Amino acid sequence: MSGQTLYDKLWNQHLVKQRDDGTALIYIDRQLLHEVTSPQAFEGLRLANRKPWRLDANLATPDHNVPTTVKERAEGNSGIKDPVSLIQVQTLDDNCLAFGIEEFKINDPRQGIVHVVGPEQGATLPGMTVVCGDSHTATHGAFGALAHGIGTSEVEHVLATQCLLAQKMKNMQVRVEGELGLGVTAKDVVLAIIGKIGTAGGTGYAIEFAGSAIESLSMEGRMTVCNMAIEAGARVGLIAVDDTTINYLAERPFAPTAEQWGAAVADWRNLVSDADAQFDKVVVLNAEEIEPQVSWGTSPEMVTGISGQVPDPKAALDETVQRSHARALEYMGLQANQKITDIKLDKVFIGSCTNSRIEDLREAAKVAKGKKVADSIKLAMVVPGSGLVKRQAEAEGLDKIFTEAGFEWREPGCSMCLAMNADKLGAGEHCASTSNRNFEGRQGYGGRTHLVSPAMAAAAAIAGHFVDVRTLPANDASHAQEA
Amino acid sequence: MKKFERFEGVVAPLDRANVDTDLIIPKQFLKSIKRTGFGVNLFDELRYLDEGQPGQDCSQRPLNPDFVLNQPRYQGAEVLLARRNFGCGSSREHAPWALEDFGFKVVIAPSFADIFYNNAFKNGILLITLAEEEVDRLFAEADANEGYQLDVDLEHQRVTTPSGEILEFEVDEFRKHCLLNGLDDIGITLQDEEAIRSFEETHRQQRPWLFRQPA
C-alpha cells in the first residue's frame, strides 16, 4: 500500500463520518468570518433558532468594505460613507456581539484582511481545518492546514454543526525545482504556475506545492503561493510543515502554550506527504526559467514574463481560446505582440491578501527608496494587510520611504483588490496590482488590472510603465526576494 | 429550499468561457445583507450599458441590446447554456442567488468551478456537466431555433432536446436527493450530532492546542 499525501492525512484526521453516497462530514477547527459573506448565515441561524456549535472556533474581522484613508478610519464605523457598506460592517459587529464571537473591530490594531490576520495571530495552525466565506482561504494551506473557501450556506452549516459536508478531492503535486533568480518572488512563481496549468487546471484537486524553490520560501512567500491556488481552479493549496513553519508560529497569541509546544511540534512534523505517496497528477516547473511575471488579460492564466509580449489571439490553439484572448485584448486596450514593458500605467496598488505582509512591503520599499512615482501615475497606494503589519512597517520607516516617493500610505483592508470600498479604478485605467484577480471590472468598472509582485509594482510606479526589476541597479531590487 | 421538479424551459446561450463570479454579480451588489433581490443585477456589466449601483431602479437603465438575456427570444429563460469553467473566481454565494432570483433553474456547461458548484446546489440550482461536443451542439441548436427549449429530468438524469435526442448526465446521489426533496443540509447533518460530539471529544484530547484561546 502506498503512503499518504499531506492532503490525505489532513482529511483522515478530520473525518467524522463517511457516507455511502460519497459525501463525508469533516470537522472544522477554525472558521474566519468577515462582513460580506456572513450576514445571511447568521440570519439563517436566527430563523431556524440555532446556536453556533463552538464559539471559540470562530474569529471575525471586517475587511472588504472598510475605508483605508487615515481620516475616515479615525472615525471608526461612522467613517464609512457608503450607507450600504456601513450596514454590512455594523451587522458583523452586531452578530458577533449577539452570538458571542470574538471580533477584531475596525480600529482594533489586530484588524486586517482575514487571511493576513489568521496566520499573524497563530489562529491558523498546522493540522487544522480552516474555512472562511472567501475563496482565498487557500492561503492558510501554507501552514500544512486543510483550508478552503466556502459559500454562505456552508458558513451557516459550519456555525451550526462545526462540520462541513465535503467530497474528497484528488491530489496534485506542483513541484518547483531549483533556485529562483534574484528579483523573482513567490508571486512570480504562482503566476507562472497558473500560466502553465490554466485557470481550471486545478479544478477538483488539492494542490500541494513542493520542490526546493518552494521550500526556500519564507512563510509569507508560501502564503502568497497558496493564496492563488484558487486562481488555478484548486480550492486547496498546501505546503508541508518544516522548520520555517514551526519557527514562524512560536509565541503567536493563539499558538500552543509552552507546555503544549513539544507535543504540538512532534505532531506537526508528520504533516508532510509520505515519500511513497501517490499523486493523481504531477506538474514540474524549473525555477531558473521563471522570470518576473505580468498578467496582460482578464484571467490570471493570461500571464507572461516581463521580457515577453502580449500574445496574438490568432496564434491560440482552439477557437474558444482565440475568442477569449481577442475579447481580453479589446477590454484591456492592448495590441497583439505589444511588448509588456511598453504597457503604460495609471494607478499602482500594493496590498491584498496575496501581497500585503511585511516582507511584501519591504520588497516594494527597497525599490521605491529615494525615487519618485512617475508624474503620469494618478495614484500609487500601499495598503498594509493588518494593523500589526502597518505598525511594524512604520517602526521600520517603510511608510516614510513610500510617502517620500509619492505613494499614499493607507489603513488596512481589502481595498482596491476588489474595490468594494472607495478605492477603485476608473474606466480604461491600467493598474499594476499586487492582488490576485484581473477579471473584467474587478478593480472598478472598466478598470484594467495587471497582476505583478510588490517589487514589480513599485518599479512600475517609478517608471510609469512595466520594467524588469532585475535590470534595476543592484542596491534597489536585486535583494527583493530575500528576508 | 423548493423541490426540484421536471420542467421544460427556454434556453439562453451565453457563449463565453471562464465566466467568473465577478461577471455574474459585480462586487458593489455584495453589500446587501439579504439573500434575495440579486436577479436584476445578474450579469450587470454585460446586461446594462452603464455602471450599476445597489438599490437603483434598474428599469430606467440603458440595456445592452447585444446581450443574450436582453434579446426578446430568450425572455423567460430557465436554462442557461454556458462554456467551460463557468463560475470561477470568488466564493460569493450571491452568484447562485442572482441566477436563481433571475429565474434560472439549470446551468449546462462542459465544466464548472468547484466552489460555485457547491453553492449552486445548495440553492436548488441544478448544474449539468455535458461533453464539450454536446454543449457545442446545444449552442448551435439554440441559436438556430427561436424558442428552443430543453426538457430537464433530474430524477432520470437526462436532458431531452425538441428533436427527441436524450443527453444523459451524472450527478452525485446526495446532491440529487437534496434537490429532489428540497432538503436543508444542516438538518441532515444534525442527525449525526452524537457522532460529531464524540469525534470532537477525541480530537480535543489528541490535539488540545487546536482548541486553545489566547490568555
Image: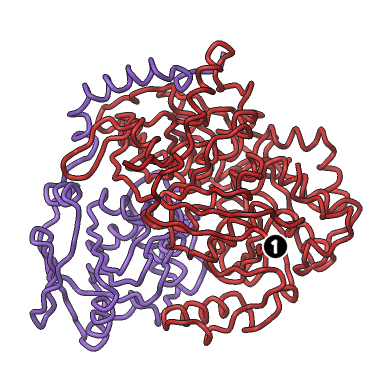
Chain colours: A red, B purple
| A149 versus B114 height, above or below | above
- B159 or A405: nearer the viewer: B159
- Residue A300 at x, y percent in the picture: 54, 63
Q: Which residue corresponds to the image point at 12% horizontal and 47% vertical from the top-left? A: B181
| Callout 1 crowding tier (Cα within 10 Å): few <14, some 14–19, many ≥20 | many
Q: Nearer the viewer, residue A414 or A275?
A: A275
State whether residue A336 appears in this view: yes
Q: Quadrant of residue B9?
A: bottom left
Q: Circle 1 is placed at which residue position?
A: A292
Residue B196 place in picture, x, y as percent: 27, 25
State the quadrant of the C terminus of chain A: top right
B203 relative to A230 in the view: left or right = left
Vertical relation: A57 (above or below) A360:
above
Decide if residue A21 is on the left or right side of residue A232.
left
Label 1: element kind: loop
Residue displayed at 72% across by 40% down: A358
Depth order, front residue of A17/B153: A17
Which quadrant of the figure has residue B161?
A: bottom left
Give the x, y percent position of residue A224.
Answer: 60, 48
Give the tally of numbered discs. 1
Residue at (27% x, 20% y) in the render: B197
Give the residue at the far right of this rendering: A370
Q: Give the side of residue B68 with respect to residue B106, left or right.
A: right
The numbered mark 1 sits on a residue in which chain?
A: A
Type of the residue with mark 1: Pro
